Amino acid sequence: EESFSMDYGASDVLEEKTSSKSIWNPLTMALFATYTLTTAAATVPILLVPTIGKELGDDEESSGFASRAAASAVLGTACGKFLNGPVGDVLGARQTSFLYACLLSMALISIGFCDTVHSVTRACFFVEFFQSVQWPCILIILATHYGPQQQSTTSNHTLYEGGIYITSIASRFGSLLGIPFFSS
């Protein structure tokens, strides 16, 4: 009678996680793509502020719209950084990142259905609120796979630091990608 063991040692799991020695491994590439696309999507309200102000408001309403939208976006980022940490702790980083990316897309779609500048200002708040959780989730995912709590090896430190470096570039890349794409 044969028995099959599902017992994997810690070294087997660690070896499986770090089998790709390049910092451009599938995990880092997926995180780079996710953060690039969510950052590019979050540039949409910023680029559309002048057009929205002209289309939806009269002169009195639209005169302060740009500053209110910008303030709302900054407030959304600040509140998101403060409130989304416990959500990430409860749901987990991957699930939170996915959920908030979906909510970000819904907030962006809601901008198209807004009929006043005040509703657009609220939508700008939620766009930034939902986008603000992506970077902390990326750091948690990288730390889970390559971070200091794993067996200390040079390749783990290289993958962890390389992953942070590559994904930190993704936000700038996403902004630069979003500006010409959405402004044309």
Image (cartoon, grey):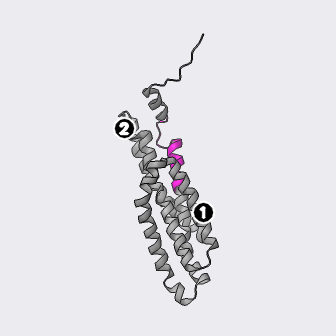
Quarter location, residue 101 = bottom right
Stretch in magenta:
20-35
The reply to whether callout 2 and callout 1 are in contact (CB within 8 Å) is: no
Residue 107 in which image quadrant: bottom right
Query: Residue shown at 55%/72% (left/top)?
Result: 47
Within the magenta stretch, is there residue 140? no
* Residue 25 within the segment the image draws in magenta: yes
Estimate how packed mark 2 is, as few (under 14), some (14 to 19) or many (20 or more) residues with alpha carbons within 10 Å.
few
Q: How many marks?
A: 2
Which is nearer the N-term, disc 2 or disc 1? 1
In the image, what residue occupies the spot 51% across and 55% down?
A: 35
- Between 38 and 74, the one lying in front of the other is 74
- Residue furthest to the top in view is 1
Q: Which residue is mark 2?
A: 149
Amino acid tagged 2: Gln
Callout 1: helix, strand or loop? helix
| Neighbourhood count class around disc 1 (C-alpha, 10 Å): few under 14, some 14–19, many 20 upward | some
19 left or right, relative to 57: left
What residue do we see at 42% from left, 53% from top?
A: 86
Circle 2: element type: loop
Q: Quadrant of the C terminus?
A: bottom right
Q: Horizontal and vertical percent for residue 42?
A: 53, 64
Comparing 53 with 28, the one in front is 53
Give the percent coordinates (x, y) of residue 94: 51, 47
Residue behind mark 1: 106
Q: Which amino acid type is shown beneath numbered disc 1?
A: Met
- Asked whether residue 138 appears in the rendered view, the answer is no
